[in-house]
Image: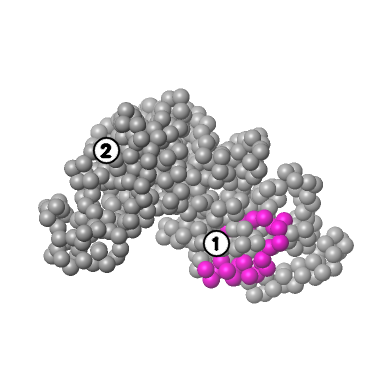
Amino acid sequence: MFAGGWIGGGTALADLRNEIEKRRTFAIISHPDAGKTTLTEKFLLYGGAIASAGMVKGKKSMKHAVSDWMEIEKQRGISVTSSVLQFHYDGYCINILDTPGHQDFSEDTYRTLMAADSAVMVIDASKGVEKQTIKLFKVCVMRDIPIFTFVNKMDREARDPFDLMQEIEDVLGIETYPVNWPIGSGKNFKGVYERNKDRVLSFTYNGVGQEAGAEVMDVHDPGLKSLFGEELYNTLQDDVELLDGAGGEFDLEKIRHGKLSPVLFGLALTNFGVEPFLENFLRMTTSPLPRQSSEGEIDPFSPDFSAFVFKIQANMNKAHRDRIAFMRICSGKFEKGQEVVHVQGGKKIKLTQPQQMMAQEREIVEEAYAGDIIGIFDPGIFSIGDTVCAPGKKFQFEGIPTFAPEHFNLVRQTDTMKRKQFIKGTSQIAQEGAIQIFQELGGGMEEVIVGVVGTLQFDVLEYRLKNEYGVDIRMEGLPYQYIRWIVGEDVDVKALDLSSDTKRVQDMRGRPLLLFTNSWNIQWALDHNKGLRLEEFSRS
């Protein structure tokens, strides 16, 4: 009996390891309009997760990107919130975290990157490295995770590929390794040279919206000259020689620590180069990475379940007015209905309605493994950064810092009879991390100060309050530019000597903080209040 139990346990552990090793979890990042959402959908097509891709271009089209589920996203053709998508391909279980490209929603992207094990960076071939790409890239570097680059839109007049490689290295500070190499661009885009296979994929395009053809040919095939033309053929031969002679070395360890980015060229809109990119990505990435906690590193292959909340989203299903907490599983196996410890709440709870997402579409799951993302119905107990783990364990994963808001508005409802809806709406949207709300010290919720990282978040707030909570609001711009939390519980905030245009407020948790119109006022507060300590970030 002992032997049978041991064998069963050994088999269970082997099955657990096998399932976790199949997992790949990555985020897709880019500047707006680089083609990130299009690339995401092509991945899903290859995995059989969707039958046809939505086009984000063209206001007349009734199709929209499958990962853009909010009505405002469909209207504006932009992503304003991260989506979680899962599909299977070639024996792997792949979790894609599709992030907002717009800089005003970078806080949501930042939190999402905390749940990823690697990142795919999409760059427009004609524009190169853009501002938002730089900001998001720095978050990836901080995480020490692999970064793969897809240079998109090769059907447009593109920058010289050597210049693009140099720009990535100079601006982002990471070495590059071209896995494939483009042959021409724009109307003269003829395909790519695959370096590791020493062959050419020739590009043939049959019309807008259709899939491009790709013929495989040996790079030394004399027929290439007539196919590409003498000029492009000679350029290819020179580029191949230069890449082999002066290009950097392929180093898998550097790739896995975010020091070297594999670069592939293609055209997501027509599927050209997408499948080779996916295959190279899967070959070079690893299974789920360990996570740091208050008890040290947590091994993903540990049989003890653990996860953390990185995103909360209310009203994904208008009919049910529900609220979903997105969890990244960090170790072990999750089973529907299992009992876990909510560490921050100090209670045992049952996770009874686990779901996996395809944007707003969802499916109840019976089990999931380290690396997977699951959505849990949240009755209002979870906050971003919370840890859940197996009974008997009480560690906490590293917290997710909150960006300091840069823009502030005074917000009030226009109809005083909608006070309850106003409080519920602003509170829930704030709990998602989309906005931060503050009140006068000791004040009520009839009006609140809303702080955001980007001003477009105000538009989303107004839209969602009206469409999801039935509340119309008035917003009034405020002059504050800086926010600082007060450190220490024994500080008499009302007694502080402050400049006349500094405002005393409190956050949702009742913690006191100060709003300043300029940096000079911050220094004034520190100079005139001995021992006062201020922090730029809130801490969970």
Asked which quadrant contains residue 304, the reply is top left
Give the percent coordinates (x, y) of residue 416.
31, 31
Q: Quadrant of the N terminus?
A: top left
Provide the residue designation for mark 1.
130
Residue drawn where x is 50% and y is 48% of the image: 100
Give the percent coordinates (x, y) of residue 411.
34, 43
Q: Is residue 167 magenta?
A: yes
534 displayed left or right of 175 = left
Against 273, residue 334 (above or below) is above
| Residue nearer the viewer, 62 or 34 | 62
Mark carried by residue 212? none
| Residue nearer the viewer, 420 or 251 | 420
Number of disc labels: 2
* Residue that sits furthest to the top in the current view: 319
Task: State the extent of the magenta-drawn residues as a range.
Answer: 149-171
Amino acid type shown at disc 1: Glu
263 displayed left or right of 367 = right
Give the percent coordinates (x, y) of residue 219.
78, 62
Asked which quadrant contains residue 470, the reply is top left
Can residue 422 be seen? yes
Residue drawn where x is 42% and y is 40% of the image: 462
